[in-house]
Image: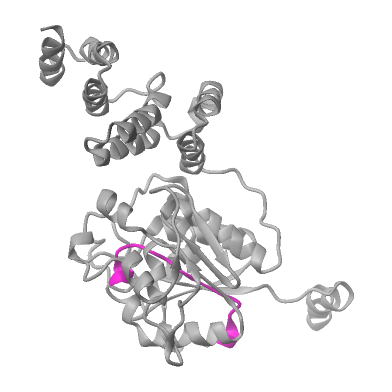
Amino acid sequence: MKNLAFIIITILPAIFFGQTKPAKIVMVVSSYGKESGKVRPGFDMEEFSQAYLIFKTNGLMIDVASPKGGKAEAGPFNKDKPYNKTVSKDAVATRLLLQTKPTSTLVAENYDAIYVVGGKGPMYDLVVDPSLQDFVLEMDKKNAIISTICHGTIALANIKKGDKYLVENKSLTGFCNEEEAMFGKTASEFPFLLEDRLMLRGAKYKKGEAMLPYMIRDSNYITGQNPYSTTLVAEEIIRALGKTPVYRIKYKDERSMELVSRAVLGDTVRAREKLKKNAENYDLELIAVYGYYQAMYAKDDLEKIKKAVAIIELVTPYYFDENLYIPLAEYYIKLGEKLKATDILTIVLSKNPGAQKAIILLTKLKE
């Protein structure tokens, strides 16, 4: 009776409805991390979590591998992000990260796709892992999906196909030099930068705006520029495997960076309308911090400062942080908009009458 039940449940549907076994993907993470990134940088948990949940929801079979195998450690990450919370409670995901397969054991015929997770760690170990390089070559031979996110793209940089580099003439992206300068806290320790190395190897490196979603698909290669490109890459992998991604509600940070992208392209009116309608659906701090970093990196370029300030202004009706408002006042002063600077500083002092920097700036404005 048990055998009959097995045939009815598993074999007959495959015969009559053409069902096949689900596609299988291996997620590759760095083994370099130590003590949660305090000693050595590891893989990026956000880039793992968001992709893992999309793969799982869309029915993919998932393995996780690393150069050394065994436990893989992520760098510092926000444990309160919904996707990280969900993955931390997922017993299968936890086991996969504690018992990663050594890349030396991977066999290409067992997989339909590979997804290389970023983080700083790959710059130290995935870039020189010979087993991973051999595996990617075998995956390339069978035209399987080869995908990477952020710093994970560096895993492709040193692979040779005959006497040429595998990435030569391929359109690829990954964490760009501008992003390293703005947000790469450990970039100065790298022996090289990802963008430079890919271009040196002959890749057609492309990039979008710094820290905004950007993904490229070139034949069987799918690459994302930064952490905010993770869901774009993961869902494109699902499409490349012949499926339509299951509908899901986007995360706050996804919606926020999409809104910033719209504003950067000049559509601040629509962005304001969306926030006015549902500000609670967005990560207001993330939007403000994005604008702050853009303004800080602009230095004395007034046009860039103006664009960055426009991003911060999107959330000022709904969000207050003294540490962001005071720099905003300073940027207004640089732009010659003293009235706006005065208004911002007045708001700061109404909430914190003892804010010395605000008092000093306001005094100078009144002189």
Q: Between residue 234 and residue 330, name the one nearer to us.
A: 330
Q: Between residue 184 and residue 93, name the one nearer to us.
A: 184
Give the side of residue 80 with respect to residue 255, left or right.
left
Residue 121 is covered by the magenta coloring: yes
Q: Between residue 207 and residue 107, name the one nearer to us.
A: 207
Which residue is found at the position 42% from the left and 45% from the top? 81
Residue that protrudes farthest toward the bottom in the picture: 162
In the rendered view, how is the structure colored?
A: one colour
Residue that protrudes farthest toward the right in the picture: 16
Q: In which quarter of the image is the C terminus?
A: top left
Q: Does residue 307 lie above or below 34 as drawn?
A: above
Start-end of magenta stretch: 108-123
Q: Please provide percent x and percent y for residue 15.
A: 86, 79
Residue 194 seen from this side: yes
Q: In which quarter of the image is the N terminus?
A: bottom right
Residue 281 is covered by the magenta coloring: no
Residue 106 seen from this side: no
Q: Does residue 257 lie above or below 68 as drawn?
A: above
Q: Please provide percent x and percent y for residue 231.
A: 53, 54
- Report the number of numbered marks: 0
Q: Does residue 290 lie above or below 356 as drawn?
A: below
Which residue is found at the position 29% from the left and 39% from the top? 293
Give the side of residue 133 with respect to residue 332, left or right.
right
Question: Residue 163 is drawn in which quadrant?
Answer: bottom left
Which residue is found at the position 34% from the left and 74% from the top? 200
Q: Please provide percent x and percent y for residue 185.
A: 22, 54
Q: Please provide percent x and percent y for residue 17.
A: 86, 72
